[in-house]
Image (cartoon, helix red, strand yellow):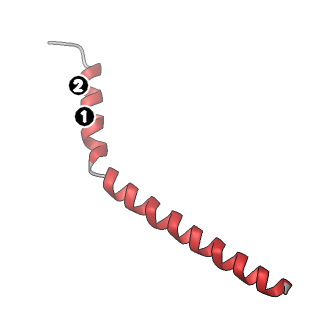
Amino acid sequence: MGSWSLAIAASIFLVLLGLVTHWSLIVLGALLPVWPVLGELIRRRRAPPH
């Protein structure tokens, strides 16, 4: 019975690890185009007014 529990625990761990990796990459890919825009807005806000 111990080997079955170990196999089930390992498979659940791998599934959760895969889900976390998958969603991390999706969120990173979604935020990647936004990053330069945010950087530009922050730079303009910090720049002294003309």
Left or right: where 25 falls relative to 36: right
The correct choice, above or below, for 48 with respect to 35 in the image is: above
The kind of residue on which mark 1 rests is: Glu
The correct choice, above or below, for 32 with respect to 2 in the image is: above
Residue contact at pointers 2 and 1, CB within 8 angstroms: yes
Residue 35 in which image quadrant? top left
Query: Quarter of the image containing the C terminus?
Result: top left
- Identify which residue, 46 or 24, lies in the foreground: 24
The residue located at (18%, 13%) in the rendering is: 49
The correct choice, above or below, for 31 with respect to 37 in the image is: below
The residue located at (39%, 55%) in the rendering is: 28
Crowd rating for badge 2 (residues with CA inside 10 Å; few <14, some 14–19, many 20+):
few
SS at circle 1: helix
Crowd rating for badge 1 (residues with CA inside 10 Å; few <14, some 14–19, many 20+):
few
For the residues labelled 2 and 1, the Cα–Cα distance comes to 6 Å
The kind of residue on which mark 2 rests is: Arg
Marking on residue 40: 1
The correct choice, above or below, for 38 with respect to 19 in the image is: above
x, y percentage for residue 6? 78, 80
From the image, tell me which residue sits under label 2.
44
x, y percentage for residue 33? 26, 51
SS at circle 2: helix
The residue located at (62%, 74%) in the rendering is: 14
